[in-house]
Image (spheres, helix red, strand yellow):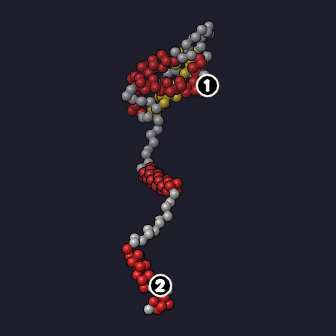
Amino acid sequence: MAAKAKAAGGKEPEEEAEVAEAAEGAPAAPLAKPKLPLKLMAIIAAGVVLVAGLGVGAYFMIGNVRQSQAAPVPIKPAVFIDLPEVLVNLSNTGSDRTQYLKVKIVLELSDQLLAQQITPVMPRVMDTFQTYLRELRPTDLDGSAGLYRLKEELTRRVNVALAPNKVNAVLFKEIIVQ
């Protein structure tokens, strides 16, 4: 019989029983899952976040385009008020020569109603301008940066004088330093 088993399977029945018993009783060896390196996982996660961010950004940009196309806002024309010409002598710091500043100013407003509200307080605006301009030195007006600072300061001062109303900008028609 042992000869038949050897000829048929090459193993004796006792060996087969031991192999079967070992296979049933012992836990099977777990299959090893291939693990991704940590760097690769971080790169994949960053890619997913980037794609999601681009998708959300595109969604909002397309949504804003649709909203702007749906309801065009009518543009109101600006209203301009000419102020009287201002002529002041500049602050003299040790120089014998007196220098003068001549300025023609225009206020840019958002609507005509605001222009009607500003007219009664125009003396206050002119006083604010005169007081500030008399304190300037000729060097304060040098170059485009000096004129930009002057424009910003006059805008700030006129808005303080007109509060709660507000002008959009102070524009220069003419500036002469003599």
Instruction: Tell me where residue 91 sits by quadrant.
Output: top right
* The image quarter in which residue 100 lies: top right
Q: Which mark is residue 70?
A: none
Residue in the image at 49% along x and 61% along y: 35
Label 1: how many Cα within 10 Å (few below 14, some 14–19, many 20+): few
- Determine the residue positioned at 45% across, 17% down: 127
Q: Earlier in the sequence, mark 1 or mark 2?
A: 2
Where residue 151 appears, as percent x and y from the top left, is 52, 26
Location of mark 2 (residue): 11
Q: Is residue 137 visible?
A: yes
Q: Is residue 130 above or below residue 68?
A: above
Task: Give the x, y percent position of residue 143.
Answer: 61, 25
Q: Secondary structure at mark 1?
A: helix
Taking the view exactly as shown, the residue that stands out farthest to the front is 2
Crowd class of label 2 (few under 14; some 14 to 19; many from 20; radius 10 Å): some
Secondary element type, mark 2: loop
Residue found 54% across the figure and 17% down from its top: 136
Residue 87 showing in the rendered view:
no
In the drawing, what numbered circle is on residue 143?
1
> Residue drawn 39% across and 72% down?
26
- Residue 110 location, quadrant: top left
Q: Is residue 45 left or right of residue 144?
A: left
Residue 142 in percent (x, y) is at: 60, 22
